[in-house]
Amino acid sequence: MTRARPCTGLVLATAAVLTLGACAMGTDEPTEAELRAELAARPSIEEATAAQDEMLTEIRDAIDAAIGPQDWRREEVDSASGCRDFPGNDGMVRDSDSWIIDGGVSDQEWDLVEQAVTTVTGEHGFHPPSVIRDQPGGHTLMISRDDGAIVDLGSSTNLVLGATTGCHPRT
């Protein structure tokens, strides 16, 4: 009569669980070719910048609708740089111009501003905002998207709205 070894099944089952667990954890980093393909599939930096500028117009319009028309002042920003998320020098990140309401908004208006901004950015695939600062007279939000794009909004002395594209291919 042959007797089964009691540990053999346990060892095989443990090995299978560990192997499947390692695969499920996704410990493999993307290859350079995969990263290049991901970057190439994104819109160009010019297209991303145009979409970002359009979204910022929608945000300003939503804020105006929520708290009344504002005198927005544009502060030009000339900022573009390469990005480290992808190999080589094929990618670029660009900051938007800043849009400013001199004097900021009141604490009562801030809730309406936050809601308006969250609605518009959500329509553009952004996550709910991260509250960086929320105290009387000073509020700051950072809103991000999976491709690395960020919208920043803060109000204290002035309300300042700006954005940064994620990494996009140069054209």
Image: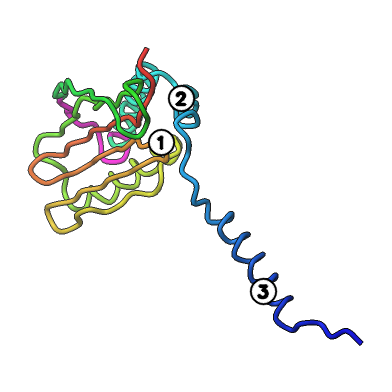
| Residue 121 lies in the magenta stretch | no
| Residue 70 lies in the magenta stretch | yes
The secondary structure type at the circle numbered 1 is: loop
**From the image, which quarter does the N terminus lie in?**
bottom right
Question: Is disc 1 in contact with disc 2, using a CB cutoff of under 8 Å?
Answer: yes
Horizontal and vertical percent position of residue 115? 34, 47
Q: Name the residue carrying label 2.
A: 42
11 in relation to 101, above or below? below
Q: Does 1 sit left or right of 32 as displayed?
A: right
Q: Does 4 sit left or right of 71 as displayed?
A: right
24 in relation to 28, above or below? below
20 in relation to 63, above or below? below
- Mark 2 Cα-neighbour bin, 10 Å: few <14, some 14–19, many ≥20: some
The three-letter amino acid code for the residue at tag 1 is: Asp
In magenta, the rendered stretch is 64-73
Q: Earlier in the sequence, mark 1 or mark 3?
A: 3
The secondary structure type at the circle numbered 2 is: loop
**Residue positioned 53% across, 56% down in the render:** 25
Q: Earlier in the sequence, mark 3 or mark 2?
A: 3
As rendered, which of 67 and 162 lies closer to the eye?
A: 162
Q: Disc 1 vs disc 3: which is toward the camera?
A: 3
Picture quadrant where residue 69 is located? top left
